[in-house]
Image (cartoon, helix red, strand yellow):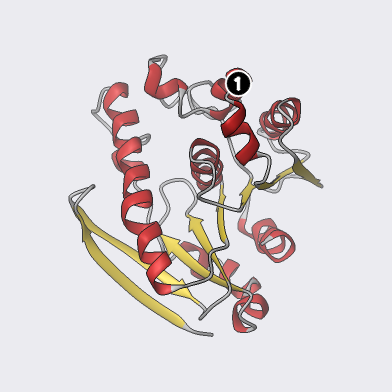
Amino acid sequence: MDREYTQWYSPVLQKNMEMLIFGYGGASVLFFPARMGRFYDYENWRVIEALRPKIENGYIQVYCVDSFDTESFYSTGFHPSVKISRHIQYEEYILQEVIPYMDVKNPNSFKIAAGCSLGAYHAVNISLRHPGVFNKVVGMSGRYDLASKIGHYEDLLEGYWDENVYFNMPLQYIPNLTDESKLEILRQLYIVLAVGNADVLLDNNQTLSNLLTSKGISNSLYIWDNEAHQARAWRQMVANYL
């Protein structure tokens, strides 16, 4: 299996950002790491190994990017307004640096955003906020409103709310999305959500699925048995849905 390591100094984030790339062609998969994860986690967790047949046959090329969570949502000492601003910077890094890099490296125009845990949030949020950039998104064990407490998951914005928070929480902005031109593009996006029936985030995923459906945005919600917020389940999920 082709494997390549790359890194560059990000002008947007003003730091070196690292990445692993697996495969030589096919659809480009932008794979966001789990909460506070690293670009090598999916390889270490054998999630990439589960994708070996698709990668080696040239169906997909996987770009495992690094996270920025410890400098945004999970940073310490920053005011919540700074946390959300730093998250927006990370999104700009993806759009202004990573996507163009993928376009140069892989001429296949079909793009998939994917992620597990907080990576699912990143994948789904960027796909919904920027219609037309991705053709498909796969969110596994995701949480789609980080500004609310859900079970043992804390409100990552500590009760703070502003326009930036609103426009980055899918469960908040999707209900009020009325721009038909934007909705029409989103209706062409293939959306897959997967979560366990014993996961604390089950209702969160069901709510997002229902909201998307209410806007005419088709999506598939797969509910797995038991608790699926773990690498063992993610290995099976990527083989099924990517």
Instruction: Please state which of residues 187 and 207 is positioned toward the viewer in this rendering.
Output: 187
What quarter of the picture does the C terminus occupy? bottom right
Instruction: Please state which of residues 197 and 112 is positioned toward the viewer in this rendering.
Output: 112
Q: Is residue 120 left or right of residue 13?
A: right
Instruction: Please state which of residues 187 and 2 is positioned toward the viewer in this rendering.
Output: 187
x and y percentages locating residue 91 in the rendered image: 37, 43
Q: Is residue 37 left or right of residue 25?
A: left
Residue at 17% x, 50% y is 14
- Where on the picture, by quarter, is residue 20? bottom left
What quarter of the picture does the N terminus occupy? bottom right
Residue at 74% x, 62% y is 240
Residue 153, compared with residue 126, is above or below; it is above
Q: Is residue 233 left or right of residue 26?
A: right
Residue 196, compared with residue 39, is above or below; it is above
x and y percentages locating residue 26 in the rendered image: 58, 74
Mark 1 is on which residue type? Thr
Q: Which residue is mark 1?
A: 178
Residue 136, compared with residue 53, is above or below; it is above
Residue 143, compared with residue 109, is above or below; it is above
Q: Residue furthest front?
A: 181
x and y percentages locating residue 194 in the rendered image: 71, 46
- Numbered disc 1: secondary structure: loop
x and y percentages locating residue 51 in the rendered image: 63, 72
Residue at 68% x, 40% y is 187
Label 1 crowd (10 A; few <14 / some 14-19 / many >=20) = few
| Count of numbered circles on the image | 1
